[in-house]
Amino acid sequence: DTTSANSSQNTTNLYTSTFSGTSSASPIIAGAATSIQGIAKEHRGSPYTPAELRNILSNPNTGTKSQDPWNDRIGVLPDLKSILDNLGFNSDIPNSSSILEGNQFAWSLKGISEFEFAKINFNKSTEEMQIDLKSGVPHHYFNETYASIKVQSATGKVVYNKDIYGNKQQNAESQRVPVKVGDYIELTHLEGIHRATLTNVGNSKQESFGKKAIYQVTKEGLKKAEKMPEATILDGNQFAWSLKGISDFEFAKVNFNKSTEEMQIDLKAGVPHHYFNETYASIKVQNATGKVVYNKDIYGNKQQNAESQKVPVKVGDYIELTHLEGVHRATLINVDSSKQESFGKKVMYEVTTEGLKKVEEMPETTVLDGNHFGWSLKGYSDREIAKVDYNRTTEKMQVNLEAGVPHSYFNNTYASITVKNSTGSVVYNKEIVGNRQQTAEIQKVPVKAGDYIEITHIEGEAVKEKTRATLINLENNKQEYIGKKRTYQVTSTGLNKID
């Protein structure tokens, strides 16, 4: 007995039913005061004033009065739990005996003749739930869902979902499910009052959870919740976008499966909307570094050819869609939840582990991404000897050669421009000799996706003179030195360097 003493007991190291003097009162009062002020600051934003704290501690309704206040002169022995209950802070006093507090929990779901058809073990420390379904018919009286197990993340994403039919043969099945703090667990059982049990493995407490129970995983263990979080349209693994034009003609459909990391883009033959003599819609995919993986501008009043393409899209990549009439004719569909929403004139998403996340901007594109590029070749005194302008949309390259001697110090090929088609045949070739007089010349060369552009410059790697051979992206104004030799292949998204 460590809480009381009588005449037949040794009172050494025992608490007694009486107390007296400031020496015994001080540590008790100080501890209570510190706890109260700390909790008050957390909940109220500021601690109690000295007068308020004195009244709280001396309230006889929340403590034990001294047996002899005249002699003791210490007033009331405070009961911290009663004080916090009285102040409305009772949730801050953990009840270690609660069935919902701990690290390990188990649920048992039983059917006819107490046959345990499902067992769930959850270890909060390892963030893992083991779900074991046993082979057999749970309860042949019930021609409907007899029980169910569901796990959702804090965002509402369904991590695990199992409906167990009463009179159907169930196969044996074991599955590990990741479950962490913030996640939700929902269990249902038509006969749950007598055949559905929660067990706290740590303290062996048990309770029936009834026909339905929802728990949120907390730092302390579990907390009963009123409802599961609702998944948003952006949570899931499968998404689709529908782009429509005049008379609601669906000219483009995009399907994205996050699990397979694949996007299927289907363009349908036809004129999207003949009222619009401009880009009516667009689809773009970029990776996290800004490299454009796919880019398609869809013109309103131009005939569109049927086209299907698979595009790799993974977590961290970005998707951008535009539509001039997107408020009514551009839709995002969550294939998992069937939720839909219009995405308006422009929307950008980042692919996340949970699904999609709307963002304000795409990562910056690189010098090689886009439709319009230029090359500048300079010679002696940094005089521009050749300029190349390439428009990927029109599939035309214009080469401008300036009159003059490129560089009199070099009596061999100083720079060159070569275009080859996808089979390797030379479409255009120009060699510029350093000390030879060059005449002014303008030439247009057809260049399309799959073709190759090769640029050389003898001073392309010199410390000071390397600025004499430059690639410029005319859309984002990014530049880079090309060195002594650089070969590019034209792609559907811009240029690709070939080593």
Image: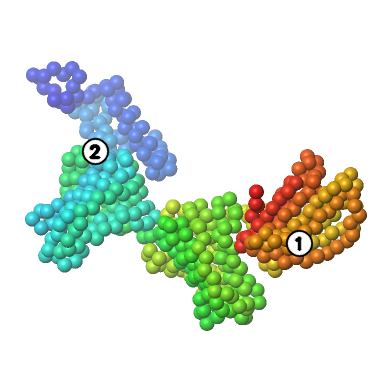
For residue 438, what is the image quadrant? Answer: bottom right
- Residue 446 in view, yes or no: yes
What residue sits 87% from the left and 49% below the top? 434
Residue in the foreground of this view, choosing between 248 and 399: 399
Residue 42: image tag:
none
Q: Left or right of 436: which side holds 498?
A: left
Q: Left or right of 496: which side holds 132?
A: left
Q: Inspect the image, locate mark 2, and give the three-letter code of the amino acid beneath it.
A: Ser
Provide residue 272's location: percent of width, then percent of height: 57, 77
What residue sits 67% from the left and 59% below the top? 424
Q: Is residue 24 above or below residue 206?
A: above
Q: Left or right of 176: which side holds 320?
A: right
Tell me the residue that label 1 is attached to: 428
Provide residue 498's location: percent of width, then percent of height: 65, 52
What residue sits 65% from the left and 52% below the top? 497
Whole-angstrom CA distance, mark 1 to mark 2, is 83 Å
Provide residue 282's location: percent of width, then percent of height: 58, 67
Q: Inspect the image, locate mark 1, and give the three-letter code of the amino acid beneath it.
A: Tyr
Provide residue 274's location: percent of width, then percent of height: 61, 81
What residue sits 17% from the left and 40% below the top? 204
Residue in the foreground of this view, choosing between 455 and 262: 455
Tell me the residue that label 2 is attached to: 96
